[in-house]
Image (tube, rainbow, N blue to C red):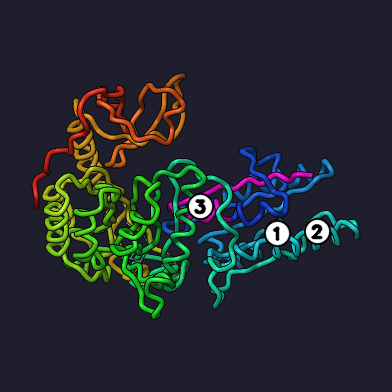
Amino acid sequence: MAKKLFIKTYGCQMNVYDSARMADVLAPLGYGPTDNASEADMVILNTCHIREKASEKTFSELGRLRQDQARRQAEGSDMIIAVAGCVAQAEGAEIMARMPEIDIVLGPQTYHRLPEMVARATRARDQRRGRGIAKHHGAGVLDTDFPAESKFDHLPEAMGSQGVSAFLAIQEGCDKFCTFCVVPYTRGAEFSRPVDQIVAEARKLSAQGAREVTLLGQNVNAYHGAAPSRSNGDGSSWNLARLVRHLAEKVPELRRIRYTTSHPRDMDDNLIAAHRDVPALMPFLHLPVQSGSDRILAEMNRQHTADHYRRIIGKLREACPDIALSSDFIVGFPGETEADFKATLRLIEDIGFAQSFSFKYSPRPGTPAANIEAQVPVDVMDARLQEVQALLERQLIDFNRATLGRTVPVLLERLGRDPGQLVGKSPYLQAVHVTAPEHHIGEIVDVEITTLGHYTLGGVLAAGPAALPLPERAIA
Ligand code: 5AD
Ligand code: SF4
């Protein structure tokens, strides 16, 4: 009988990708997706450890799930609970000790072994049931290794369609060790998938209907995967710029290519030139800067200054004048003064972002910054966050307003909430609602933008001339 699998995903897009792949791994075992956790035979929480708040969500959700599990057991059925992702990696043993009801704890590098873990967990359960033991007694499966073999060599082909816009992991892990960040510990050292493997997955995604692919990696522009075996099997490696050009040529069905998340240090001239030369490479870049203060950037071990960042943006805008920019900011990093914070505001004013994410610094266990004594008081952090968010919000509104009245090419991705409405994306990653027949899903259509919502734009199908790029923004 078909079994039901519910996966709840927290955090970044890499987790969204991992969740899709975990579903692929479990499909041969008879697990199909459900949207309803309480009727699931197996629930996976794919967790995020980046900030304390993200981590805490795991534990409150687990509390609810344990109740569902107890109810299912009382009814004579059962539910396997698995915790995956970065909280599992960082706190796996503690989770198992605290919550013996959990069957499986697995890290981001071992999910190709899920079938084996499920078999072990199911066996342990059947044995308990045979002996009339209802409750678990710490018999869970814990697998948070960093195995020598790559999970990518063992995963089945991508099966469950991700739709028109798909994610493809090309790189994972991080060797940068920013002093605030858990990623190098939870995801491990940098690893790039070979070009051949990526092209094969891209073809598969396009055969399943993808027209846009977002290449994923924690440090995606540090990509250095093995060259394709036929063209250059000499053990050399390719950078991201070359991979993007190759994908655009070899898989032209993918009309749009994006990549995230990048580090300023790896934003090299080749990649900037690809933004000029490759039409499929979308004019949008998420390039976290974190702070505008050189002193704080040094404390963060970011290995670049604010002016270095300004110069990169200047070059990018020269190569691709309509490129829209996005960033991450942390306020209240230990020792951040009012002057440091003002430098961040100045950088934001200078550059002008289309959208951004900003966070209060959250001390993470095991990271160097957590041990710095000069932590910034919470009320100061709150005030700074409000100020930075107000500025970023103004920039977002300005950016969206600049699209009003223009015609932009929109990739239609899915049905909207209202009847007859479809939702798609502009090149600049804005969500656009438009009235159009369903069979247009998967197509790029010209849309005249006629209304501005808070986070979305509305428009009408344009019969007129091809799309114009946005006006050039002030170059820092
Ligand atoms: N505290 C606050 N924000 C953080 N980020 C990463 N670690 C922390 C932390 N300890 C933010 C950074 C990063 C984004 C994914 O999360 O801005 O770019
Ligand atoms: Fe974390 Fe810095 Fe690596 Fe990004 S570059 S994942 S912020 S350590």
Which residue is found at the position 42% from the left and 36% from the top?
A: 442
Q: Nearer the viewer, mark 3 or mark 2?
A: 3
- The magenta span reads 1-21
Picture coordinates of residue 92, whole percent (x, y)? 59, 66
**Which quadrant of the figure contains the N terminus?**
top right
Amino acid identity at mark 1: Asp
Is there a contact, CB below 8 Å, between mark 2 and mark 1? yes
Disc 2 versus disc 1: distance between alpha carbons? 9 Å
Is there a contact, CB below 8 Å, between mark 3 and mark 1? no
Q: Which numbered marker is on residue 103?
A: 1
**Is residue 91 found left or right of 462 in the rendered image?**
right
Q: Secondary structure at mark 2?
A: helix
Is residue 305 visible from the viewing direction of this image?
yes
Picture coordinates of residue 365, whole percent (x, y)? 44, 67
Asked whether 463 or 275 is in front, the reply is 463
Q: Secondary structure at mark 3?
A: helix
**Which residue in the structure is indicated by mark 3?**
204
The furthest residue to the right: 131
Asked whether 214 or 379 is in front, the reply is 214
Picture coordinates of residue 281, whole percent (x, y)? 29, 51
Please rate how many residues cluster around mark 1, counting C-alpha atoms within 10 Å: few if below 14, some from 14 to 19, many from 20. many
